[in-house]
Amino acid sequence: MVNRNNYKLTREFLDFLSEIKRLSPGSLHRYKVYLNHFLIWLDEMSIEKCDTKRPSFPSFLQTSRMDQRDQPLIIDTQKKIVQTIRRFLHWLKLYHTQRFKSLPEVWIDSLQPSPGVVVAGEHEYVTLEEAVHLATILLGQEKQVFLRDQAAVAMLFVSGMRASAFSTLPIEAVDLPAMTVKQWPSLGVRTKNQKHASTYLLDVPVLIDVIKSWDAFVRSQLPTSAMWYAPIYGEWSNRTVSPATPGKNRNISLGKRLMRLSQMAGVPYKSPHKYRHGHAVYALLQAKTMADYKAISQNSMHENINITDSIYAWLNGDEIKQRIISLGINKVSLEEADNELENFLCKLSRTELKQAIIRSAQLLAD
């Protein structure tokens, strides 16, 4: 049976996230689900004593099941749940200081998924070569539709935008001369947690040319308030772009169109989010300093570098070395290094750096 006082604290935390942090309903729902796992684990024990409960919370998660499907929680979900619970416990110590004074900070910080959930393997993302191939291959059927979808491939890769933001991006939010995208909720862009930011495009000329071609066309046909990834209606021989407002599932339609484009091009399909991951991988491969890393983090619309750093809180020391501070692949001499980070990078192999960059980019994309 769930402890009533524990339940009240989780709801207070959710209210805080909604009213102060202004999280979206979707994000709040995920937090609620994650917190429910914690409540079930505690049972009747109060949160104040959670550091003494056995089995541990990470061990409990390994045996937990998803609702309805009765399937084990996937690795990434376990990581996100643990990260959420750490954030919740730190909030309790901040806003209920006296009540949770005895709950050790060191125990909270030590919470991480059990080692058994860490599985080696390649992380999937869209490479520059794949993006260029999809964006430039000549396709005869449904020409206008595929030109739009190819422009989507190019824009998703060079911008690193989430599918929900891209699919609701109005023409007026795209400023190609300035290589800028205005991800502004005030313009109707559906950003994560309603964040507001101007982000920038990677300068990949072959993809930028594809984007410019579609941008010029859609501006000639529609008002600037219409969608950049515009709906296309009509018969095969008479298709036209439309100023219609996108539906709630526009990002799902985007995924289906990219799947169709991949089939036509004869390449394996990768979801829109894999383009965001690919954007981060490509950018990190070019990065040489911590300033570059910060720029990539901000362009991913993280509020600050601490948000990005918090993603890696569950990692052990070796993983931190490989996945966070490895921000470039070019070796530099100690004499040329301009900071401690670059000095350390000299000690890592090219393979270690590349593996670290791929994993770090995945975490940035998430």
Image (cartoon, helix red, strand yellow):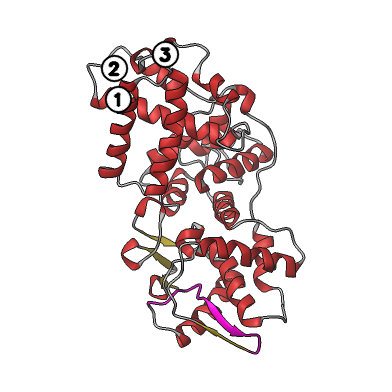
The reply to whether the magenta stretch includes residue 228 is: yes
Q: Secondary structure at mark 3?
A: helix
Residue under the point 58% across and 40% down: 333
Separation (CA) of disc 3 from disc 2: 11 Å
Separation (CA) of disc 2 from disc 1: 7 Å
The amino acid type, in three-letter code, at marker 3 is Asp
Rendered residue at 46%/87% (across/down): 220
Q: Amino acid at mark 1?
A: Leu
Q: Is residue 160 above or below residue 92?
A: below
Residue 92 is tagged as 1
Label 2 residue SS: loop
Please say if 31 is above or below 218: above
Q: Which residue is mark 3?
A: 51
Q: Are marks 2 and 1 in contact (CB under 8 Å)?
A: yes
Q: Answer with left or right where residue 199 lies relative to residue 233.
A: left
For the record, the magenta segment spans: 225-237
Give the amino acid at mark 2. Answer: Phe
Residue 1, percent from left and from top: 42, 19
Q: Is residue 36 left or right of residue 8?
A: right
Note whether 109 is above or below 333 in the view shown. above
Q: What secondary structure predominates along the stretch shown in magenta?
A: loop
| Residue beneath disc 2 | 100
Q: Are marks 3 and 1 in contact (CB under 8 Å)?
A: no
**Residue 120 position within the rendered picture, expressed as x and y whole percent measured from the top left:** 68, 33
